[in-house]
Image (cartoon, helix red, strand yellow):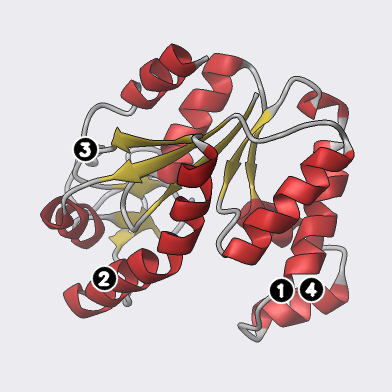
Amino acid sequence: MIYILTGGPATGKGTRSDILANALEIPHISTGDMLRNVAKKNLEIREKLSNGELISDEIITDLLEQRILENDCKEGFVLDGYPRTLKQAELLDVLLAKYGRAVTKVMELTIPDELAFKRILGRSKCTHCGASYGIDFPPKRKGRCDICGGHLAVRTDDTAETLSKRIETYRENSKPILDYYRDKGILMTVDASAHPERVVEEAQMEI
């Protein structure tokens, strides 16, 4: 079982990937987390990330290959944050075919734009421990972290203007990837405005 979760801003890819992976007892692989972990030991990648430079498709694919060959991926995995381009989607297919495997299902998470704005503009993060909060998971005390009591702050780039641009960019960049998987007959759409557990229910119906 190899699942890919994709979606625009505020669709909750990370949360839903965790839920799906736990339900299917397979690992959740976030390429963003994977790169950050590798950067701790790899100076070249660390410098690229620090400078805001793009990591090449080939490097990401090589790192992903190392990860999926680990024992916990034998029964499958849930991919979050990859592929982001059509080229990456094609490289992923070549990589998986190398080991006699293929993507089982691609799940596009969708929400109305107005909900995306509510989620993004209503989220905050603890400046001390890093815990995150939002309209679906509000803190018990306004402005204070439930875990450590630290101050909650919002990201400076969480504005209506930047969100509009991110939504537009996602739609433009994702179209060729979604068309690619739609042509393969493995693309499904999931309403991410519903309860997070719904993604698990829909995935299991497809197994």
Return the residue nearer the eye: 45 or 201: 201
**Amino acid under disc 1:** Ile
Q: Residue at x 60, y 29 (%)?
A: 104
Question: How far is the residue under mark 3 from the one under mark 2?
Answer: 17 Å
Tell me what residue is drawn at x 73 percent, y 68 percent.
57
Q: CA distance from mark 4 to mark 3?
A: 35 Å
- Whole-angstrom CA distance, mark 1 to mark 3, is 32 Å
Which residue is the site of mark 2?
163
Residue 75's quadrant in the figure? Answer: top right
Give x and y (percent) for residue 118: 15, 55
- Which image quarter holds the N terminus? top right
**Quick one: label 2, few (<14), some, or many (20+) residues within 10 Å?**
some
Q: Say which residue label 3 marks.
A: 193
At label 3, the amino acid type is: Ser
Mark positioned earlier in the residue sequence (2 or 4): 4
Residue at the left extreme?
A: 114
Q: Nearer the viewer, mark 4 or mark 3?
A: 3
Q: Amino acid at mark 4?
A: Ile
Left or right: 136 in relation to 44: left
What residue is disc 4 on? 45
**Disc number at residue 33?**
none
Q: Earlier in the sequence, mark 4 or mark 3?
A: 4
Q: Tell me the residue that label 1 is attached to.
A: 55
Q: CA distance from mark 2 to mark 1?
A: 23 Å
Q: Secondary structure at mark 2?
A: helix
